[in-house]
Amino acid sequence: DQQVKQNSPSLSVQEGRISILNCDYTNSMFDYFLWYKKYPAEGPTFLISISSIKDKNEDGRFTVFLNKSAKHLSLHIVPSQPGDSAVYFCAAKRRAGGTSYGKLTFGQGTILTVHP
Amino acid sequence: DTAVSQTPKYLVTQMGNDKSIKCEQNLGHDTMYWYKQDSKKFLKIMFSYNNKELIINETVPNRFSPKSPDKAHLNLHINSLELGDSAVYFCASSQQFDTDTQYFGPGTRLTVL
């Protein structure tokens, strides 16, 4: 039972255009969401996050949008650069307590390729 | 000045063997984790230690035993390796248990033949 899903295994985008990566979750108790980026032969590195009390968080070229009613979040990268080519993982956690407290639940990742 | 390091990077072994993966963090964090990335690419938490105390123990076969000799180290020992144990294992750390951001090591690719 995968509580966080990234249904697009891969995405190919031209340099300078927008990349939109999507993530869906099923557990309504999740209240904090993160995106991680992973290059080959390296571990995931934190990119950006959003609390469930917000619907948008922006950091430079990266913006995360959260739609709680749809249990959906997306990561927008504008403009996309070849160096953004990596695997992007969505993750969710429950901050407030309960059995999921403190644990990160990850999606399966989306491979982003940005062509020059 | 690697923040979270793991050894070895690659591990190839026969079924039935016992092996260990080591993890060290030099960030001064209190909490460390082990994740398994399975064939479907999901990263799933296995264990978490906070100040050398086990706080998360997911449904993992008891052939897997984590050991934390001190706050900076969390090792993973696997007994009687099976084919299904083949995966990439990631170690991670966070400042405290409820800190949102976790820092990951480069991963150990385990192949069981």
Image (spheres, grey):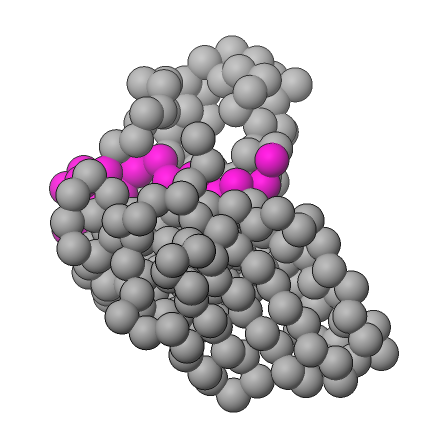
Measured along the vertical axis of the image, is residue A26 above or below residue B80? below
Task: Report x, y in % for residue B93.
Answer: 32, 56
* Magenta extent: B40-56
Measured along the vertical axis of the image, is residue B66 above or below residue A91? above
The residue that appears at 45% across and 13% down in the rendered structure is B80
The residue that appears at 55% across and 34% down in the rendered structure is B38
Q: Quadrant of the C terminus of chain A?
A: bottom right
Quarter holding residue B61: top left
Residue that protrudes farthest toward the front in the picture: A69
Looking at the image, residue B58 sits to the left or right of residue A81; the answer is left
The residue that appears at 53% across and 65% down in the rendered structure is A74
Task: Report x, y in % for residue A109.
Answer: 58, 51
Task: Report x, y in % for residue A59.
Answer: 47, 84
Residue A32 seen:
yes
Residue sitting nearer the eye, B111 or B70? B111
**Per the image, is B3 magenta?**
no
Measured along the vertical axis of the image, is residue A1 above or below residue A78? above
Task: Report x, y in % for residue A64.
Answer: 48, 72
Looking at the image, residue B107 sits to the left or right of residue B52; the answer is right
Looking at the image, residue B36 sits to the left or right of residue A104; the answer is right
